[in-house]
Amino acid sequence: MDCVQFYKCLADNTRLKLLLLIQQHQELCVCELTTALAISQPKVSRHLAQLRQCGLLKDRRQGIWIFYQIDPQLSQWAQQVIELTLAQNVRFIDEDNSRLKQMGSRSEIRQSCC
């Protein structure tokens, strides 16, 4: 991965939050991310597509829902940057995590929206 492209992808507040939430929870669906960030589904999907195009995310389809995770093929240096960014800036996504928790347990979420 080109480092300039990597940092350009992370330069947007929404994309950075999406990436950090996915890193923290290993995998999230679009409905979870929409709730966590309190923004519209089209906006979330657009940013997720950009992160996927940058090679940062992988997606998988389950029925009509799409789940996102950090691409396991991501270079080690890029993965370390993401991990360190999350570890040092967890408060950056505190409000988003609070909204995500309000959705209920992971199994409840998956039954209701996914």
Image: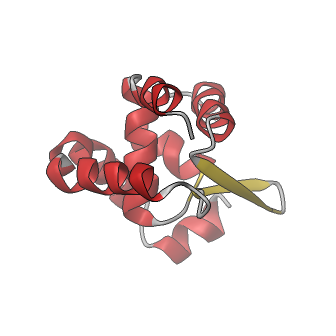
* Residue 86, image x, y percentages: 27, 52
| Identity of the residue drawn at 54% across and 63% down | 27
- Above or below, 91 against 46 in this view is below
Q: How many marks?
A: 0
Q: Is residue 5 left or right of residue 98?
A: right
Q: Quadrant of the C terminus?
A: bottom right
Query: What colour scheme has been applied to the protein in the rendered image?
Result: secondary structure
- In percent of width and height, residue 11 lies at 39, 23
Spot occupied by residue 14 in the image (x, y as percentages of width and height): 42, 29
Residue at 64% from the left image edge and 70% from the top image edge: 111
> In this view of the protein, can residue 37 be seen by the observer?
yes
Q: Residue furthest right?
A: 63
Which of these two is toward me, 27 or 96? 27
**In the picture shown, does residue 86 fall above or below 10?**
below
Q: Quadrant of residue 58?
A: bottom right
Frontmost residue, 67 versus 103: 67
Residue 5 is situated, as x and y percent measured from the top left of the image, at: 53, 27
Question: In the image, 65: left or right of 1?
Answer: right
Residue farthest along the bottom direction in this orientation: 107
Residue drawn at x 54%, y 34% as measured from the top left: 2
Residue 47 picture quarter: top right
The N terminus sits in image quarter:
top right
Would residue 91 appear left or right of 109 to someone viewing this image? Answer: left
Residue at left 82%, top 54%? 64
Q: Is residue 38 visible?
A: no
